Amino acid sequence: MTTPCIICVAITGSLPRKADNPAVPVTITEQVESTHAAFEAGATIAHCHVRNEDETPSSDPDKFAALKEGLEKHCPGIIVQLSTGGRSGAGQARGGMLPLRPDMASLSVGSNNFPTRVYENPPDLVDWLAAEMVTHGVKPEIEAFDLSHILKAHEMWKKGQITDLPYVQFVMGVKNAMPADREVFEYYIKTVNRLFGEGAPWCAAGIGPNQIVLNDWAVSSGGHARTGLEDNVRQDKSTLAPSNAALVRRVVDLCAKYERPVATAAQARQILGLRAAA
């Protein structure tokens, strides 16, 4: 348990609105300020979406550029991870921000059910997004909503479509997708170690009330943890989370409980094989 724990903060997402929790940051300024507080609390990856003025999701590269610039200025060394998720756009518009060369970008390599629709990631789009990430030197974070997504990531890695050792994130607790099941979680870890090598880094994210559950499982199992208002707007069943930073501090407390150091930005970059901050 000596490996430092990387904390990723998913600051905004595409769905939560201020009506759900006034702390959800929507404008670029709000997102930078919220991330800065989370960074100071211990987060070293910022998972980023952008919104329009009416709070609807956007894939506008100019908005991503402004957010990336603000984060790099106010959170020195933070790992900027931009979302290519399907709620923000359609087709190749989902990867329109990749020429900005963020440190990382999310990559969903397969389709699955979401609460009210199918989350579509057709093979030709997955291949195109992966190729764009290679072209622009962006490390993908594999969003694994299903076991098959881990196996697909391995196939793409062996074929050279993913050039670095994949960083897989287990996403559990999405309605109609994979629930937060401890035995499945343990098998995910076993599968990552078998396919990518013992000790390959991985992360876990839980949705809604499962966030703190997956935080605990990840920290106590030697993995890395994602938190933030994108996935969960509550501190507990009866209390809204006051900020992204407050959710990050819960993970920091778990790291103390399990006697794991919290990764600095430099340590996180080293663990993930990323280039040094500019």
Image (cartoon, helix red, strand yellow):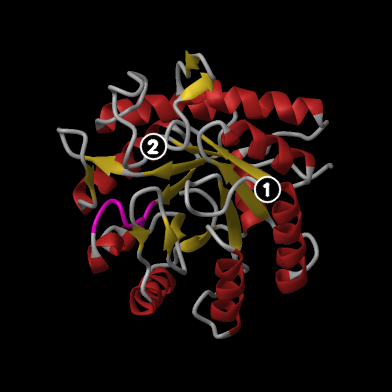
Does residue 141 sit above or below 221 in this rendering?
Answer: below
Q: Position of residue 21 (x, y in %)?
A: 36, 21
Under mark 2, the amino acid is Leu
Does residue 65 sit above or below 55 in this rendering?
Answer: below
Q: Is residue 253 magenta?
A: no
Q: Residue at x 27, y 48 (%)?
A: 65
Q: Quadrant of residue 1?
A: top right
Question: Helix or strand or loop: what does disc 1 sit on?
Answer: loop
Q: Is residue 21 left or right of residue 169?
A: left
Q: Residue at x 54, y 79 (%)?
A: 156
Q: Tell me which label, 2 or 1, sits earlier in the chain.
A: 2
Magenta region, residue range: 83-89
Q: Position of residue 45 (x, y in %)?
A: 52, 42
Disc number lying in front (2 or 1) = 1
Under mark 1, the amino acid is Asp
Does residue 235 sit above or below 150 in this rendering?
Answer: above
